[in-house]
């Protein structure tokens, strides 16, 4: 009662009083047979109960958080000055009449406690950030750094922002003044800085290797200057952050958020310029559409070294896996996956393109077409000059397949006109027998692939002749003959000739795309029906949609038809998602630019509205 209540712990005293009260109550019952002892217990119990009345006062005045302004309110209710200095002990304050305003005292004390709790939470949050630091990594072998994982920082930021917002909803937050608002603003600022910081970092890391190339800087001077300005700012801020990695210190760089926001806008402008630049390259050489931005940039960043194109040739040219360069760094031949070497009709000098990769690759494309055409022409002239089994192993596999189909077309037409189909069936069987004998010998792998593919074609050709014989075909205008896939060498104009592939009323120019020494699909009557439908759709400028169970050969049929007309076929799996932009890009490549064919697999009904 006489000790300063500022030194007392109300909770401990309250617990002790309650324990003593319970003990006295039990003793008075146990000592019922001893009147003197019982009376002593009851007297002590009465004193304790008298003191218990003052516990609420003790609890109120001992509460943490009571400040001068709270004592001022207590004084106003009491009608006289009251504070711990004037009334330092519980006895003093009780004598001052504090019991008369106990409800008001408890209300003021509870409010003070709530305010104290809010201050404690705010202080704890601020202290939590004292040891939180950014984790940085050196960027490659440069003198700058990048932020590592910030997941823990982001989690703590989100938690503290939510806790601060919850504090601000408390009715007792007024006592903190603007401190809660200031802290929330600071946390929000840090979060915005980190968000834009990481956004800048992602784009900067993508563009930095690109604009480190002298070739790219030379070809994109404006974007290069803009990137270098952002790069300079990035390195300066990272040097500042690296001096003190504490989050609350590193993010105090002057106007940091505005600087990063401007960097985001500048990098977005650079990236748009880069995309426009890549689009121009793709529009000039459409096969660049088959490459990702990163792959295309890898090519364009080293224009002085044509060998850097080699790993990406397969995506641009279906049959070309490698180009052979001579000692003068001139391209002399193309090599397929099957290691088939086909000489080009003329040498290509990449250096003459002055670093413009798309120019000499376009020359590779045109030279490839001319080379395949020339091989076809010479092979056609040589077909009847040597034995067929010797001719087969002399020419590239694609040429052998195409010319064999052309020779078969002309020979069948001669047999129809001469009514000699039975004899031609025997000739077809003899040719198949010769190939079977040849394939049993010890052959090079490329030669074996060629012969196996030719056997597949010859067997189908023999079956077609048998069908024509069974149908008693006697004229070249008979639908049973017109509905077969036929190859002709026709004049395009007075100076040029070309191979055409015909089926019913559809005539398609043979693409002359080098496809390599590939295998062929075993053709069934159902396959022929599918070919006729797709070729008919092509005549009408439409697409085709083969339908059937999984694994029945829908995609392979489309791919083999593309081989038949020497066109590059690109298969796209629509199960990964498809929208009108992607579909429009495919149509732009396919129809207007690259002369390629596209096969969309897993094309579900929900995609039809894009068409």
Image (cartoon, rainbow, N blue to C red):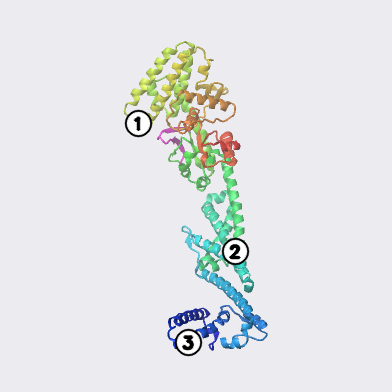
Q: Quadrant of residue 267?
A: bottom right
Q: Label 2: few (<14), some or many (≥20) within 10 Å?
A: some
Q: Quadrant of residue 440?
A: top left
> Can you identify the residue that label 1 sits on?
444
Q: Label 3: few (<14), some or many (≥20) within 10 Å?
A: some
| Residue at the image point whose x is 61% and y is 75% from the top | 111
From the viewer's perspective, is the residue at label 3 or at label 1 nearer?
3
Label 2 with label 1: CB-CB less than 8 Å: no
Q: Label 1: few (<14), some or many (≥20) within 10 Å?
A: few
Provide residue 409's location: percent of width, then percent of height. 48, 19
Q: First in sequence: mark 3 or mark 1?
A: 3
Q: Is residue 211 above or below residue 574?
A: below
Provide residue 56's location: percent of width, then percent of height. 57, 79
Q: Nearer the viewer, residue 541 or 171?
A: 171
| Callout 1: SS | loop
> Can you identify the residue that label 2 sits on?
188
Q: Nearer the viewer, residue 140 or 180?
A: 180
Q: Is residue 337 magenta?
A: yes
> Can you identify the residue that label 3 sits on?
39
Highlighted magenta segment, given as a residue range: 329-345
Spatial separation of the CA atoms under disc 2 and disc 1: 71 Å
Q: Is residue 601 above or below residue 224?
A: above
Q: Is residue 447 above or below residue 74?
A: above
Spatial separation of the CA atoms under disc 2 and disc 3: 68 Å
From the viewer's perspective, is the residue at label 2 or at label 1 nearer?
2
| Callout 2: SS | helix
| Residue at the image point whose x is 50% and y is 21% from the top | 484
| Residue at the image point whose x is 40% and y is 16% from the top | 427
From the viewer's perspective, is the residue at label 2 or at label 3 nearer?
3
């Amino acid at each position: 009662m006489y000790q300063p209540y500022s030194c007392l712990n109300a909770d401990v005293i309250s617990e002790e009083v309650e324990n003593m009260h319970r003990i006295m109550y039990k003793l008075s019952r146990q000592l019922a047979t001893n009147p003197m002892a019982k009376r002593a217990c009851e007297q002590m119990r009465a004193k304790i109960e008298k003191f218990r009345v003052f516990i609420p006062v003790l609890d109120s005045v001992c509460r943490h958080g009571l400040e001068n302004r709270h004592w001022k309110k207590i004084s106003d209710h009491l009608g006289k000055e009251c504070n711990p200095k004037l009334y330092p002990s519980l006895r003093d304050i009780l004598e001052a009449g504090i019991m008369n305003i106990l409800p008001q005292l408890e209300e003021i004390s509870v409010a003070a406690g709530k305010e104290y709790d809010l201050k404690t939470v705010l202080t704890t949050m601020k202290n939590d950030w004292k040891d939180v630091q950014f984790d940085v990594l050196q960027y490659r072998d440069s003198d700058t750094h990048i932020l590592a994982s910030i997941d823990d920082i982001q989690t703590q930021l989100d938690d503290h922002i939510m806790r601060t917002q919850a504090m601000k909803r408390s009715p007792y937050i007024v006592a903190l003044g603007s401190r809660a608002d200031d802290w929330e603003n600071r946390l929000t600022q840090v979060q915005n800085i980190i968000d834009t910081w990481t956004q800048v970092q992602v784009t900067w890391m993508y563009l930095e290797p690109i604009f480190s190339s002298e070739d790219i800087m030379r070809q994109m001077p404006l974007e290069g200057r803009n990137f270098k300005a952002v790069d300079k700012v990035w390195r300066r801020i990272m040097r500042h952050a690296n001096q003190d990695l504490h989050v609350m210190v590193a993010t105090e760089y002057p106007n940091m958020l505005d600087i990063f926001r401007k960097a985001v806008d500048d990098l977005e402008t650079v990236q748009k310029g880069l995309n426009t630049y890549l689009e121009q390259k793709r529009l000039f050489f459409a096969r660049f559409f088959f490459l990702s931005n990163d792959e295309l940039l890898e090519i364009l960043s080293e224009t002085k070294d044509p060998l850097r194109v080699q790993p990406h040739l397969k995506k641009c040219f279906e049959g070309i896996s490698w180009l052979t360069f001579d000692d003068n760094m001139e391209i002399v031949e193309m090599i397929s996956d099957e290691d088939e070497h086909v000489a080009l009709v003329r040498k290509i000098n990449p250096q003459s393109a002055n670093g413009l990769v798309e120019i000499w690759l376009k020359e590779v494309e045109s030279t490839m077409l001319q080379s395949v055409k020339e091989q076809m022409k010479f092979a056609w002239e040589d077909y009847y000059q040597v034995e067929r089994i010797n001719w087969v192993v002399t020419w590239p596999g694609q040429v052998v397949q195409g010319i064999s189909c052309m020779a078969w077309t002309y020979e069948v037409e001669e047999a129809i006109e001469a009514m000699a189909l039975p004899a031609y069936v025997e000739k077809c069987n003899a040719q198949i027998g010769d190939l079977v004998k040849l394939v049993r010998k010890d052959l090079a792998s490329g030669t074996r692939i060629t012969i196996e593919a030719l056997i597949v074609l010859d067997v189908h050709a023999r079956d077609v002749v048998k069908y024509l014989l069974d149908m008693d075909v006697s004229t070249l205008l008979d639908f049973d003959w017109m509905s077969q896939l036929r190859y002709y060498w026709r004049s395009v104009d007075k100076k040029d000739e070309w191979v055409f592939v015909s089926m019913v009323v559809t005539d398609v120019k043979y693409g002359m795309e080098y496809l390599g020494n590939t295998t062929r699909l075993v053709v069934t009557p159902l396959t022929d029906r599918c070919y006729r439908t797709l070729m008919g759709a092509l005549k009408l400028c439409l697409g085709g949609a083969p339908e059937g169970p999984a694994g029945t050969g829908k995609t392979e049929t489309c791919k083999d038809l593309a081989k038949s007309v020497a066109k590059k076929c690109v298969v796209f799996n629509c199960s990964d998602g498809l929208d009108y932009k992607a579909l429009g890009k495919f149509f732009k490549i396919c129809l207007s630019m690259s002369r390629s064919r596209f096969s969309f697999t897993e094309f579900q009904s929900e995609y039809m509205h894009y068409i």
